[in-house]
Amino acid sequence: MQARADFYKQLGRPVLLYALLSTFFLYDNASGITVILFAAATILLCRRALNSAGISPVKESRVYGSLMILLAVSTALTGNRFIIFFNYVFMFLLVLCLLLHHYYPAQDWDLAACLSSLFRCVTGAVCMIGAPFLDARACQKERSGKKSGLFLHILIGLLLAVPFFIVSVSLLSSADIVFLYALRRLLQNWSHLHFSTAAGVLALFLFFFFSAYCGLRFFDRRDLSPRFTEKKSYSAVTAVTMLLPLTLVYLMFSVIQIVYLFRGNANLPAGYTYAGYARAGFFQLLLVSILNTFLVIAVQRLFREHRILKLFLTVISACTYIMIASSALRMLLYIRAYHLTFLRVLVLWALAVVALFLAGVLIQIYRPAFPLFRYGVLLLCVCYLLLSLSHADYLIARYNLQSVSTEQALDVDYIISGLSTDAAPALRDADPSVKGYFLLRHERDLTYDIRSFNLSHFLADRILNPRKL
């Protein structure tokens, strides 16, 4: 009971203030400049919670905070809804990782332990939905000797004020015509607030309040025991036997890629052209590359070390690099024929991330002490941040406009409907009709105020709207 009261006294008001500010920053404003203030408020709330729990910041805290701020800045710079959504996803995951590393310090976090802990944190916070009420009640009972029935007294005072307020406003309105007009104007302004708006604001406020309070309350209990997967001692012979046929298949596939795709001087089966052969299979190869990476990690963790096993894992990793190169080459040939789309950019980005992560896996094969999990987390954060800040829609529009040929018509509909306002600078010299349709498609995004200011929307408005040039 005392712990509940203490937690409520320490964090009740900060969480309430955080919920109010976050609602003001983000309601109907997912990509405005106030997202940066939201990220800063989230970091400050986490710091307040750690201070109240007597926890000193760890060295990773600045990294987490810096990444959150950079993601918020990226959100205010882009109009790409995919990027905006995943910016929030990454910010949420960074907050959970920040709190996990402080409340449950550990030296050997691995992928299984982290994913399990993140899931249990979310479900645990949901189960704490009644904590704000129970904590407030405990705090009220503790203060009963000093401030007996404080909330009840306030409620009675508000009820008594209602009739006096109505009578006073009626008399003052009849006594002064200027006051009456001012009151009418105020009521007219309030009439623009629809019920749906009020309900949306209330729902967002409750979401921020309960998610922040219940999440911090769950961490404060410290009853989460991170489950680290211990290495098994299965025989390496089993792993070698399992990997032998797979390795032979991968070697055969790699030879075919080198002969048929990379060199392109071998005979293809009847009915196939080199262009058609090269432009197929990149999604399948991406999936196999990801599966191979996790296969190598699983084998390292489950089976005892052996020189032959390390050789097999190295060969599989090398073949995976050939698959990555094959998928990338196929995608580049496909892009040359059918231009760029955001999905194709994501495929190339994913191939680059897998290739870089696989380098860490190769290092761990020969140096088991290599911190693969931390390397992977840092790699994913940095690579996603680069994607988030790259303004991919601008690069797509610029490439497609510059690569127009007589053989392949430009997909104008995709530029107009499939790309965000990030593409506007590439359309500066485009056909006026294209710019006009693009503006019409993004008309809602180009209406903003100080709170919802977004650099991508602002530039699109200034570049493409002839009235503001």
Image (cartoon, grey):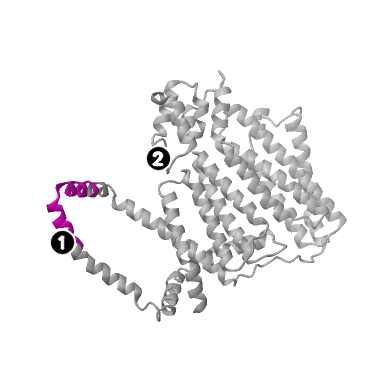
- The answer to whether 15 is drawn above or below residue 258 in the figure is below
Is residue 464 visible in the rendered image? The answer is yes
Total residue callouts: 2
Residue depicted at 79% across the width and 50% down the height: 363
Counting from the top left corner in percent of width and height, residue 433 is at 42, 22
In this view of the protein, which residue sits in the foreground, 325 or 370? 370
Mark number displayed over residue 74: none
Residue marked by disc 2: 449
Is residue 60 highlighted in magenta?
Answer: no
The residue at the far bottom in this view is: 145
Region rendered in magenta: 165-186
Classify residue 306 as left or right of residue 111. right
Residue 210 visible, this angle: no
Please identify, in this view, whether the residue under mark 1 or under mark 2 is nearer the observer.
Answer: 1
Residue 14, given in percent of the width and then of the height, sits at 47, 62
Please tell me which residue is depicted at 62% across the width and 63% down the height of the picture: 100
- Residue at the top extreme, as displayed: 406
Q: Give the amino acid at mark 2.
A: Asp
Is 446 placed left or right of 214 in the picture?
left
Residue 107 point in image, percent of width and height = 72, 63
Image quarter hosting the C terminus: top left
Instruction: Give the image location of residue 266, x and y in percent.
Output: 76, 29
Q: In the displayed orientation, state which residue is furthest to the left.
A: 174
- Residue 170 shown in magenta: yes
How far is the residue under mark 1 from the one under mark 2?
A: 39 Å
Q: Report the side of 13 relative to 164 (left or right).
A: right
Dot 1 corresponds to which residue?
167
Residue shown at 44% from the left, 59% from the top: 17
